[in-house]
Amino acid sequence: MRRWMGRHRAALSGAWVMIAAAGCCLCHTDMAPPSGVIAGPPPPALPSPWKAGAAVVEIAVPSGAALAGYGGPPRRDLTLFTLPLNAAALTGNCLDPTPADPAVLFNPSTGKKDAVNARALVLANDSRKIAIVKLDTIGMSRRLRDDLVTAASSLGIAASDLVVLATHTHSGPGGVSKQILWEVAATDCYAEAVYKPILQAATSALTQANAGLQPAQLGIGSSTVLNASENRDGRPMVIDRTLGLIKITTTTAAPIAALFNFAVHGTGYDATNMQLSSDCMGAMENAVETGIPGVVAIFTNGAEGDIAPASGQTVAQVGQTVGSAVVALWSAISTATSGALSSAFKDVAMPAPSLNPAGCMPLPGTSTTLCSLTGFPPTLPVDPDWLSTTLPFQAVSIDSTVLVAIPGEAITEVGGDIKQYGGTKGFAHTYILGLANDHGGYFTNLAQYQAGSYEGQSTLYGPTTGSVVVQSASDVINLVP
């Protein structure tokens, strides 16, 4: 999540020191066991008729909820009074002296710029029913996905066929995770008063989408969008500007859903914003729904780890640029009334969690780096109870397209490796669904990890994280046709 250190690196250095110190004191020697593997049954050899339904439900965020995404002031409430609360949170004890509002470590939000929503698509053929639920939140928790599985199963949707993902808006509701790392670093203490409305909205959107299932047509295409995004690490040529679109209509060509995929951080509004917002991703959806009357627009994020909105562009301008590209691409895509559908889901035990505070920085007064002495940057262990030690990976194939759901924020190169592998398996389109089903932080490659970039410092499973993510994504791609 951008700017845990980023813009507020100095303000947060003390918080990271507290995290590291508490992590070293609290580290456990036993890793949590993996929860196993869920894989879908073999897909049908022949396509069958499509059915689809979509819905959008606003999330009723309570007044005064914290906003998630920026870990430093002015979002974080840092005073002599609140410093002990931050210290207590590091030990797993979130103490709330003002229970009337949900904010504890962060300042309360002050209103709403625009709606934050749950959006759902249910897609089915004769053999399978897939659901994609998207929330205007900073990230996804496995707990929320597992809670939503109950509703999905009652609708005939298997756990392995449910994708739940976040847009990564940095002005969405906080207080939604019980994991200590995310509570302290970017989301504030868990608040049941915030979590329940999010789950309720997700459940309602899923239920309504399923109730709206009807015979459908589907088509998929890609284009390139310029002037909406940029690499934020000073590497301007390292960027994926691909826009992917799944066009779904009724058999009479009336719009049902526009599921689109684009990589960008939800940081159009900076840390001074104290009002709820779906950020530039919501602006994209609004532009699509204006340009395609009657459609439910559903944004999905790609490998956005090192990608920001274009400099000098407002939230509305970025939204209009991408939204207009979706509308243009919609008109160019032809549709078919039947197709093949498959999915696969795999839980992966990740390497031991750790912090990478410096990368391969040179030793003072020398050109010798820490890595030249140790092979890898020195790291600090993190208590495995602070975050997920097992992460879910998922693939959904729709004809010759594969959607690869990964539980965090991949940088461009890691996303590119996954896309390249999808191409080697014969898929015409491979789209990354980032921030899906759980959150494991940033997924960077070895070079950026060693460089000590912001994303490298925020990669939490060591120097092999990127290769583990690419391999796990490849494994689930192998399980679908």
Image (spheres, rainbow, N blue to C red):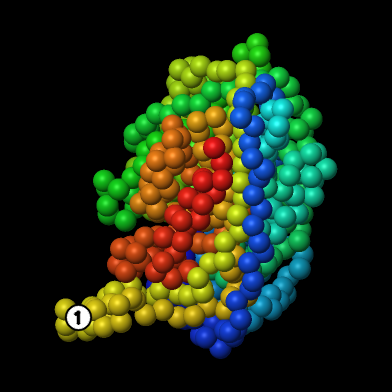
Q: Residue at x 58, y 18 (%)?
A: 336
Give the residue type at disc 1.
Thr
Q: Residue at x 27, y 52 (%)?
A: 235
Q: Which residue is identified by label 1?
A: 368
Instruction: Name, please, the residue furthest toward the top.
Output: 252
Side of 453 relative to 365 (left or right): right
Q: Residue at x 45, y 17 (%)?
A: 332
Q: How many marks?
A: 1
| Rendered location of residue 307, percent (x, y) | 39, 49
| Rendered location of residue 356, percent (x, y) | 40, 74
Q: Residue at x 16, y 82 (%)?
A: 366
- The C terminus is located in which quarter? top right
Instruction: Name, please, the residue furthest toward the bottom.
Output: 25
| Vertical comparison of 97 with 241: above or below | below
Q: Secondary structure at mark 1?
A: loop
Regarding residue 272, the answer to whether it shows in the image is: no
Regarding residue 346, the answer to whether it shows in the image is: yes
